[in-house]
Each structure stands twice: as structure tokens, then as C-alpha cells.
């Protein structure tokens, strides 16, 4: 979203020949708010819905927890011994 905002800003400056002062005063704050809100709000929602899980290669992503080897063939909501995250967590992300 931030890259979109930068590209959109320069498109307006170059293509439509609007003044930089006007854009800095009127458009730039909205581009910052838009890019921040469209990235922070969904990520916070996924965090509260407990949809972030390890996807087995070391990164956390919005994924279902049934792909973990200890969850194969186990019902949703069961916490295996030695683990803290229940199997099936993140199902409401899809």
C-alpha cells in the first residue's frame, strides 16, 4: 500500500501537473492514513482471531494449524502433550 501511495502521488504530480505544495497539504496525509489503516487493521484482526500459525518453514502466517506434523489425524481443538497451540486453530481465516 505504501508503494501504491508513492506511485499515485508521483502520477498526479507528473501527469496532471498539480502543485507539490497543494498535494503535500491535501493528499499526502490521506495517502499515509490509507496505507497504514489498510495494513494495520487486517493484521490486528487476524491476531485477535488467533489465525497466525507457524507454517513449518520458520515464518508465521495466516494458516490452519492442521499442517503441523503433530496435528495429522487429530481433531480440532485438541492440544497435544508438549504443545500449547490447539490443532485446527486458524480455521476461520479461510
Image (cartoon, grey):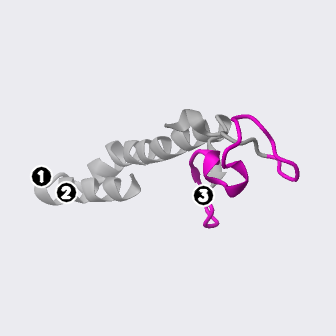
Location of mark 2 (residue): 11
Which secondary structure, mark 3?
A: loop
- Badge 2 marks a residue whose secondary structure is helix
Number of marks in the image? 3
For label 3, the residue is 55
Label 2, label 3: how far apart the Cα atoms are: 38 Å
Q: Position of residue 56 (x, y in %)?
A: 63, 62
First in residue order: circle 1 vs circle 2: 2
- Residue drawn at (39%, 52%) of the image: 1
Highlighted range, magenta = 55-84
- Check the image and name the residue furthest to the bottom: 57
Which residue is located at x 70 percent, y 36 percent? 75
Q: Residue 63 in magenta?
A: yes
Judge the density around disc 1: few (<14), some (14-19), many (≥20) Cα neighbours within 10 Å.
few
Above or below, 42 relative to 56: above
User: Where is residue 29 shown, x and y percent of the image?
Assistant: 41, 45
Q: Is residue 20 above or below residue 88?
A: below
Dots 1 and 2: beta carbons under 8 Å? Answer: yes
Residue 25 lies in the magenta stretch: no
Q: Where's residue 37, x and y in %?
A: 49, 41
- Residue 64 position, x and y percent, is 59, 44
As helix, strand or loop, the secondary structure at mark 1 comes to loop
Nearer the camera: disc 1 or disc 2:
2
Amino acid at each position: 500500500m505504501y508503494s501504491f501511495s508513492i506511485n499515485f502521488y508521483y502520477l498526479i504530480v507528473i501527469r496532471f501537473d498539480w502543485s507539490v505544495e497543494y498535494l503535500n497539504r491535501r493528499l499526502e496525509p490521506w495517502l499515509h492514513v490509507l496505507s497504514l489503516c489498510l495494513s494495520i487493521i487486517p493484521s490486528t484482526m487476524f491476531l485477535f482471531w488467533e489465525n497466525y500459525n507457524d507454517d513449518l518453514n520458520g515464518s508465521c502466517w495466516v494458516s490452519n494449524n492442521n499442517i503441523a506434523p503433530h496435528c495429522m489425524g487429530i481433531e480440532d481443538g485438541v492440544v497435544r502433550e508438549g504443545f500449547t497451540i490447539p490443532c485446527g486453530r486458524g480455521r476461520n481465516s479461510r
